[in-house]
Image: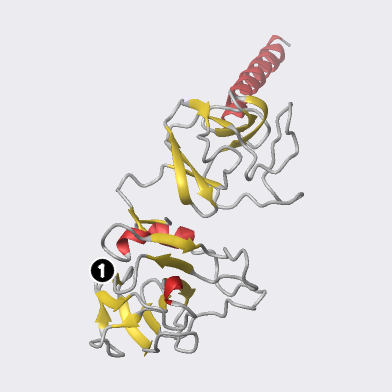
């Protein structure tokens, strides 16, 4: 009998110990989007100064969505609970061990603000209620603005972003960048020249340069600029090589001169239709440009 009691006592102790082990192990796997800002997470708050409902994350998110029930929303108690977080956050708390970068655009593009591990703070005026994505551990290598890299000099600017039409019917399939007629236009990505149409100034003279990068399986298409006379289909183009001069080929007036830059998946000779087409054919390119070392600005 004493032997049986000893066995039962030992078993009970083992179960108790096992229960204690399980109890201490469970918090380690508890981190989830539960409306509590826990260790290892990055959290948005609906109001300034870390007030209102919060939304907690354990990793990067490129697109928050904009409609329930599929969007990322505020989950904690307080003002804003249940609202989609895109363009709705005012402050943050970074409880992760990495720097977290908040972006103005989806897919890690546009103006950004960094928060070091442990930092709490309000979003800057340019990002308050304008947050569209965030990234854990962003690259520390310096990125170059696309508007600078395209011309290799200052003065360029994005005149129309991806899907950025405001007064034109259709969906804009690329990014328009302008500096001035005659400015050197440089290739942003290396690859093989697979198509060139030289065009001419005016609305009916569209020019096209298509450069395919096989390792990325992407084609970069440049419209409206005047291709250099040395370009020949089949030649290899280096990143940064001058390929054209800014012009208004396929544009109705010289005052609207710009270079349209379009990223297309796969091998493509022509740009996707933008004007008058209600459906996007290309994915949002911002994350691609970031991966190539550029800021989309």
Q: Which residue is mark 1?
A: 240
Compared to residue 13, the image places residue 161 above or below, namely: below
- Residue at point 42% right, 36% down? 99
Secondary structure beneath dot 1 equals loop
Instruction: Indicate left or right for 92 with 230 as reference.
Output: right
Q: Nearer the viewer, residue 61 or 249?
A: 249
In which quadrant is the C terminus drawn? bottom left
Percent x, y of residue 41: 54, 33
| Above/below status of 45 relative to 229 | above
Q: Residue at x 36, y 73 (%)?
A: 215
Q: Is residue 153 left or right of residue 127?
A: left
| 119 sits left or right of 195 in the view | right
State the image quarter where residue 50 is shown: top right
- In the depicted view, which residue is nearer to us: 4 or 141? 141
Residue plotted at (40% across, 89% down): 199
Label count reads 1
x and y, in percent, of residue 234 in the image: 29, 89
User: Quadrant of residue 7 in the image?
Assistant: top right
Relative image position of residue 128 (x, y in whole percent): 57, 37
Residue 218 pos. (x, y %): 42, 74
Q: Is residue 234 left or right of residue 253?
A: left
Q: Residues within 10 Å of mark 1 (few under 14, many from 20)?
A: some
């Amino acid at each position: 009998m004493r032997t049986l009691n000893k066995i039962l006592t030992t078993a009970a102790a083992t179960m108790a110990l096992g229960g204690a082990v399980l109890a201490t192990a469970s918090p380690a796997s508890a981190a989830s989007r539960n409306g509590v800002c826990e260790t290892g997470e990055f959290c948005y708050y609906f109001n300034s100064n870390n007030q209102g409902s919060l939304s907690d994350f354990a990793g990067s998110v490129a697109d928050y969505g904009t409609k329930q029930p599929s969007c990322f929303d505020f989950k904690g108690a307080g003002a804003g609970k249940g609202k989609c977080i895109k363009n709705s956050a005012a402050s943050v708390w970074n409880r992760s061990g990495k720097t977290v970068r908040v972006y103005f655009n989806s897919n890690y593009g546009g103006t950004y603000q960094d928060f070091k591990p442990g930092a709490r703070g309000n979003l800057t005026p340019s990002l308050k209620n304008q947050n569209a994505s965030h990234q854990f551990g962003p690259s520390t290598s310096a990125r170059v603005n696309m508007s600078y890299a395209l011309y290799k000099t200052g003065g360029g600017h994005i005149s129309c972003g991806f899907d950025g039409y405001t007064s034109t019917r259709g969906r804009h399939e690329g990014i328009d960048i302008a500096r001035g007629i005659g400015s050197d236009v440089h290739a942003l990505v290396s690859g093989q020249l697979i198509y060139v149409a030289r065009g001419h100034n005016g609305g009916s003279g569209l020019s096209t340069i298509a450069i395919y990068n096989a390792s990325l399986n992407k084609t970069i298409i440049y419209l409206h600029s005047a291709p250099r006379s040395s370009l020949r289909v089949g030649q290899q183009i280096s990143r940064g090589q001058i390929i054209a001069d800014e012009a208004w080929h396929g544009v109705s007036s010289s005052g609207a001169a710009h270079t349209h830059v379009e990223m297309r998946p796969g091998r493509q000779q022509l740009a996707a239709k933008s004007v008058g087409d209600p459906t996007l054919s290309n994915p949002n390119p911002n994350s691609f440009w970031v991966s190539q070392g550029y800021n989309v600005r």
